[in-house]
Image: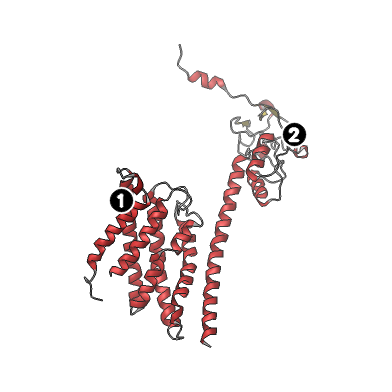
Amino acid sequence: MSVWLALLLMSALAALAALASSFAASQSRARARDALIGAINDLLPQTQCGRCTYSGCLPYATALAEGTADINQCPPGGDTTARSLARLLNREAKEVDARFGAMPATSMVAWIDEPACIGCTKCIQACPVDAIVGGARFMHTVIADQCTGCELCIPPCPVDCIDMRPFAPRFEAASSMRPQR
Amino acid sequence: MSSLLLIILSAVLLSMIAITDEGRWRPFANVTDVYQSAVGVAQAHALAVPLICALTWLLSNAVLKPLELSYLRTPAFVAVILVIVPLVEVTARRARPIVPANPAFTLLLSANGAMLGVALMSEARAPSLWRALWLGIGSAVLFSFLLLCAATLYERLRYADVPKPFRHAPILLITAGLIALAFMGFTGLIQE
């Protein structure tokens, strides 16, 4: 009788210990997953363009971490991003799939033809990084430094006044800061 | 009293060797500061030891003794420690900016003399749950104090001109031995 009691007691204690350590292990797995998603997200270009078929860079990173997405779905990042993703996730490197859109040769930013703009604010709502400023019935403009070139503002524009232009950093501002000779 | 001190001193020695070890035995990831790491281990002990003391005392007096299973106390206490330590680890991860490294942290805590030794002592000596809890709190405080002292000692020893064969673990063993000798002076101070 006492032997069975001893067995029962020790099994109960062992089961409790197993539960506790599996709880700790599941916690550490969840943390490791979050760390992996963060590491993948750091490699992505943060254009939030959605061309990978996910709603943004973080959802794509989550899908990559879960293994439901492939590494070649990010055209803005291009082959550089695909290569570094392959290295991080220990997968075979491959080129960006053309189905997800063309890779831009140079980095492009949106540009608004300001006289044509009617101030409808539709592009402001479309912009994932809040790089367009302007109010209703007032002229809008693009903050070129903030624009990721995702092209999401082009389809909503009712007057087609948004173009993509090569990103040219404004050196005039920087040079005017220099001391005059 | 002196046996409690010696149990805790051995736990401090084990923790110090783990903390100062080069490489993968460190209980905290990415911590190079010995003192900071010691603070982490001390906090984990301060949380775990009183809890384990109270639980093992309850287990022993409410379950083991009435059922005449007292011979099971050591394995049963080990099982209780293995229940508490992962929970302490989860709490430590939530609360602390420095993150315990798996599995060194769990191993260090569960294989520590302070856990089982103090649990067995409280079971043998404490007449009530409160006394067991106080013994646990007292020994946790003592452990934390000694561990932090040892950490600061070690920080100083790093810059001292210790002969090469005595560096790292040997000098720690000698230091702990000297402290243990000093603790033997407590023998008989409190009549038990």
Q: Nearer the viewer, mark 1 or mark 2?
A: 1
Viewer-nearest residue: B21 or A8:
B21
Instruction: Give the quarter of the image for residue B17.
Output: bottom left
Pick the residue in front: A96 or A172.
A96
B82 is higher (above) or lower (below) than A133:
below
The span from disc 1 to disc 2 (Cα, nearest Å) is 63 Å
Q: Position of residue B113 (x, y in %)?
A: 39, 65
Residue matched to label 1: B153
Label 1 residue SS: helix
Q: Which residue is found at the position 53% from the left and 67% from the top?
A: A20
Q: Residue A102 has which mark?
A: 2
- Viewer can see residue B186: yes
Where is residue B18? Give x, y as percent. 42, 54
The residue at the point 70 percent across, 46 percent down is A54
SS of the residue under disc 2: loop
Looking at the image, which residue is at 49% across and 68% down? B83
For this orientation, the residue located farthest to the bottom is A1
Placement of B76 over or under A117, stated as above or below: below
Estimate how packed mark 2 is, as few (under 14), some (14 to 19) or many (20 or more) residues with alpha carbons within 10 Å: some
Kind of residue at badge 1: Leu
Between residue B133 and residue A164, name the one nearer to us: B133
Location of residue A145 in the rendering, given as x and y in whole percent from the top left corner: 58, 30
